[in-house]
Image: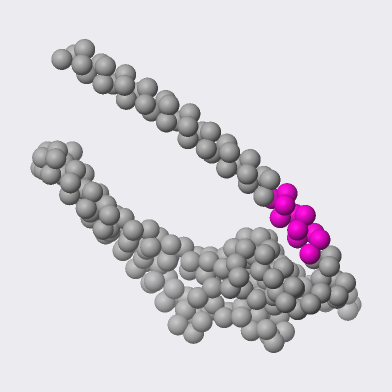
Amino acid sequence: MLLQTILQVLGFLGAAAVGSVGTWKVIDELLRKGKSSLKEDYRFAKEFLASVKSDEMHPVVTELGYQAIAGDSRVTADEVSYLLGLQNPRQTVRNFIGARHLLEFFSTAPLEKIAFRAKYQSSSSRRWLKYWYAGAYFITFTLGIAPLLLTIMNILSGAAGLLLFVFSAVMFFPLSYLAVKAGGRIGMAESLLKAQAESKGVREAVVSASSS
């Protein structure tokens, strides 16, 4: 019995070692691909933005170029061009794309062109929404993992607990993910508007300095 247990443990450790090596290879390949992609993004952005300054590009080409920089065809050239002028532009573009349904873009606004939609403008309502999503995550994650915990506590038998865990995981873990993602979108939108406000302050300071 002891020998069998030792062999099982050794087998588990061996499988874990092989799996870790395979995982590391996948991660390393993804990192290398990411570096290559960054170089390509750099070359494209440099060439495209230089072409935009020449004012010789067709509006359709300009739109496609800005969408390529953003990595999303749902944004407009005006939106991306404005976002690239804010602080930390890469993160700002990602935040705008992630939280786009919470925001409105006003192309004719003089400075701050992005604002929350009416139902999200109140900071207290956003705070309660984040509490709601956090609570939804806690409840759904707890329900998803409950059969596994009950099995560990010997309240459920191994087979029954495992079967219930499979069903609960399939049912509740996706809801947990959606709750986390929804709460994260609010944080992304708030970070974006903070960057916009900081960029506005910098621009106003520059204008004030130049006029004095």
- As drawn, the residue found furthest toward the bottom would be 108
Q: Residue 197 at x, y = what percent?
A: 65, 72
- Using the image, determine if residue 180 lies above or below residue 60: above
Relative image position of residue 187 (x, y in whole percent):
50, 65
**Left or right: where does residue 107 sit relative to residue 178?**
right
User: Residue visible at 42% across and 70% down?
Assistant: 127
Q: How many marks?
A: 0
Percent x, y for residue 110? 72, 84
* Rendering quarter of residue 171: bottom left
Q: Residue at x 22, y 53 (%)?
A: 167
Q: Quadrant of the C terminus?
A: bottom right
- Please tell me which residue lies in front, 57 or 89: 57
Q: Can residue 201 be seen at all in this image of the molecule?
A: no
Outermost top residue? 3
Q: Quadrant of residue 206?
A: bottom right
Residue situated in front as seen by the camera: 5 or 121: 5
- The residue sitting at 38% across, 63% down in the picture is 178
Relative to residue 56, is residue 156 drawn left or right? Answer: left
User: Is residue 72 visible to the viewer in this orientation of the structure?
Assistant: yes
Q: What's drawn in magenta, residue-wise?
A: 38-48
Q: Main secondary structure of the magenta part?
A: helix
x then y, percent, for residue 126: 44, 73
Give yes or no for residue 176 being in the magenta stretch: no
Q: Is residue 103 left or right of residue 11?
A: right
At 19% from the left edge and 43% from the top edge, which residue is drawn?
A: 162
Residue 45: within the magenta? yes
Placement of the N terminus among the 4 image quadrants = top left
Placement of 99 over or under 33, stated as above or below? below
Q: How is the image coloured?
A: one colour
